[in-house]
Amino acid sequence: MPTWLVYGFRWPRRAINIHVILHNLEDCAVGWLMAPDTSAELMDNFQTLYPDQIKSLPDLQFIEQYDPDDEATSEQPYAYVCEQIHEIRLGADVDDFKNRGIPSESWNALVGLRNELAPGEKIGWYIVVNGDVERWVPPVDDEEKEAEEMESNASSQPTVIEMENSRAKPEHVGDQEEVKKGGFKKWLGKVKKVRSFRDLKSDLAVRPSKASPLAAEDQPVPSPKRVAELQDDKSDIAKSTKHTSI
C-alpha cells in the first residue's frame, strides 16, 4: 500500500469534471487522474493553457488517494496536483523534506496553476495513501458482451429492402430469357387456338346442312315444262303398276 508525502494542492472532483467537459478531454477518466492516458492528456492540456507555469514545474504529477476496502465510495472528493512526491517506505522525518525548501520560481508557478484550477485551496505538504495504484477494473458482464454481439450481427445482416431486391431480380440472364421465350410461346398458342375455333365456325356458316332452311332456299326451281314432264312420268308409272297388279 503506497504512502506518499507530497507538496501541492487538492483539486476538487467537481472542478476536475468541469475542466474536462469545458476542454472536451475525451480520454480523461475524471474519477482517476493517475490513469496513464488521463495524465498524458491533462499534461498536454496544461501545456496549451498554462505554458509558463508548466515550464517551471517539470516534475508536476497527479496523485489519488484510495481505499480498496471502502466499497461505499465510488470516487474520492479530490485529487492532488503535486510539485514534489516522496514515497515513504517505513518512516520519514517530515521536517527533513520541509527544510529542503521550494524554488521561488516553482512556487510562483504552482500558485498560478492553483488559482486557475482550484482557487482558495491550500498549497502545502500532504500524506496520501493509495491501496491500489493500478485499480482493478471489473470484467465486462456477459449481458454486455451479448448485447455487443447482437449489435454486430444486426449490422452485418442484409436489410429488408436488399432482400426484396434480391428476390425480385432473376439470378441469371439466361433464366430471364427463358421466361420471356416461354411466355411468348404460351401467348402464341392461345392465339392459334382462338383462330382455329373462329375458322371452324366460319366454315360451318358457309356450308349449311341439308335440313336447314337455307339449303332448301338455295336449291334451283324446275321450269313449268319440266314439272309437266315429271307429272306425265308419274301418271305412266302409276298406270303400269295398276296393269301389273291386275
Image (tube, helix red, strand yellow):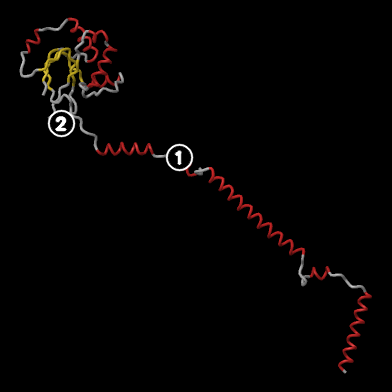
Q: What amino acid is at disc 2?
A: Glu
Disc 1 marks a residue whose amino acid type is: Glu
Q: Position of residue 120 (x, y in %)?
A: 19, 13
Q: Is residue 64 left or right of residue 19?
A: left
- The CA span between labels 1 and 2 is 51 Å
Query: From the viewer's perspective, is 222 left or right of 65?
Result: right
Residue drawn 20% across the image and 32% down it = 138
* Residue 47 horizontal/vertical position (percent): 27, 12
Please name the residue shown 47% across and 42% down the image. Answer: 166
Is 139 rendered above or below residue 185?
above
The label shown at residue 162 is 1
Give the residue number, with chain letter if any, for mark 2: 71
Res 159 quadrant in image: top left
Find numbered disc 2 in the image and state the secondary structure of the residue it sits on.
loop
Mark 2: give few (<14), some (14-19) or many (20+) Cα within 10 Å.
few
Q: Residue at x 61, y 52 (%)?
A: 185
Quadrant of the drawing holding the C terminus: bottom right
Helix, strand or loop at disc 1? helix
Given residues 196 and 144, the one toward you in this image is: 196
In front of the other: 128 or 194: 194
